[in-house]
Amino acid sequence: MPEAFLIDELHHRCMGNPQLVQRVLASFRLSFMNDLAQMEIHFLSGQLEKVAKTAHKIKGSAANAAAPAISELAQEVESLARQGNNDLDQQICNLQSEFTRFASAAFREDFRQSDDDSSTGKPTCA
Amino acid sequence: MRLVIVDDDPSVLIVLQAYLESLGYEVAAATDGAEAFELVKHGDYRVVISDWEMPNMNGIELCRKIRERSGEYVYFMLLTSREGKDALIDGLDSGADDFLTKPFEPEELRVRLRTAERIVSLESRELVIFSLARLAESRDCETGEHLERIREYSKALAQRLAQHGAYSDLIDADFVRSIYSTSPLHDIGKVGIPDSVLLKPGKLTPAEFEIMKEHAEIGRQTLEDALKAHPNAHYLREARDIAWCHHERFDGTGYPRQLSGDEIPLSARIVTVCDVYDALTSKRHYKPAFTHEKSRQIILDGKGTHFDPEIVDAFLAIEEQFKAIRKKFSPGAMPSITWSLNANLENQVTVGN
């Protein structure tokens, strides 16, 4: 399984600037939450093309945030959705779980403090 | 150099903008293709780095729209999560110049941007246009820097008209860039005028003047042929219109077709004012260089007859700019060469009549 978070890679892309790293991570967290919620809505309404587009977006933003495991999972969801595969519950749930793994590595203190907060991406599915 | 970056993911924009600014680029960020297109249309951006999939207008559509424009070449890079040979071919086939996959690798992006800069700077169209115009102009020994002044006057007038008056909806940044590039070609048809007429030091006979007038039609033919070979080169259409119509008069008494009013292309109506102003303020063998004030009055007297009134108003509003351009591009200590210059002005286009 790919790494949840490649801190060195993100630092490199951010020219070693920790403030920039934090801004990217905060922005990614927000966009991921929003995109995942959108994806679930599209999935529940059977709009697989929109599921694929949203998964594609997550794939890119996760790659940018040095989250290869999320990016890879998102690619899998995109691919399945484009094939018309409607059996995506588990993959979407896995995305949630993978984000939790990423967040625990990326946000550290920040993550622990808000562990009870559902906005951290705490998994809600089996 | 100024860049546009466009991505619907803010986290990508944050890191990309910070990195590019650290390299010294001036960066404008957009979140979809439509917003990016507006930036390109109204600003001086030579490189676009675009995501592929975006709401409203995706990267491919954006690229196509940018390619449809006239004006300076914009180097277009796709930065996308799409991978594989098919995506690469589709992207480049749509007109993109380069293709990078997310996440970008800083050093790779830096090197590829260096290539983009090199290509943009090598873009020779403007240089070729200006060289052709200079070649045509060199035969009749026009006063130095006439072409520089014409394009600067034309640009200044177009910019003013884009902001004020009845033509503001017709003129955008592309129009301004295009008239700047193509206005120096206004007299390219003079290449087809015999030396005995073009270089005659005295006043032309009526028959000679008829020959001189042919330069408008020769200019049209020359540029029309180029346009047929390159029908998507919109700037050639504008260059043709200017060369063909810059001796038409607003009241329909000009040549070669006696067009009037808005039958005359707007770009040609603008260049007409600039060309006459430049002739008036330049020394000729048959007249001294008129002062700005005298030239201004002659232009004003021609409002509605020789010249489009809207353009005369714009000229009056920015006359200080005209004076500044005149000063900046004057021959200075160099004496003016006074061969038979602008025989058309001497013989017929006695402005103010």
Image (tube, coloured by chain):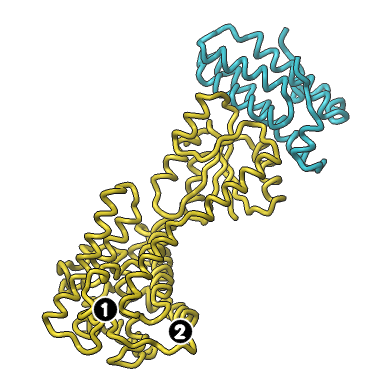
Chain colours: A cyan, B yellow
> Residue B276's x, y, as percent?
31, 79
The mark nearer the N terminus, 1 or 2, is 1
Left or right, residue B311 beside residue A82: left
Residue at image coords 24%, 82%:
B343
Picture disc at residue B266: none
Q: Choose top left, top right, bottom left or bottom right for residue B151.
A: bottom left
Up the image or down, B317 lies above or below B224; here it is below
Residue at image coords 72%, 30%:
A29
Up the image or down, A10 lies above or below A37; here it is below
> Residue B119's x, y, as percent?
53, 50
Left or right, residue B53 beside residue B152: right
Q: Choose top left, top right, bottom left or bottom right for residue B159.
A: bottom left
Q: Chain of mark 1?
A: B
Residue at image coords 45%, 83%:
B330
> Residue A37's x, y, as percent?
63, 22
Residue at image coords 64%, 25%:
A58
> Residue B270's x, y, as percent?
32, 69
Any part of residue B56 in sight:
no
Amino acid type, label 2: Pro
Q: Furthest residue to the front?
A: B195
Up the image or down, B127 lies above or below B67; here it is below
The quadrant the N terminus of chain B occupies is bottom right
Picture disc at residue B303: 1
Distance, label 1 to label 2, CA atoms, is 29 Å
Q: Chain of mark 2?
A: B
Q: Which secondary structure, mark 2?
A: loop
Picture disc at residue B331: 2
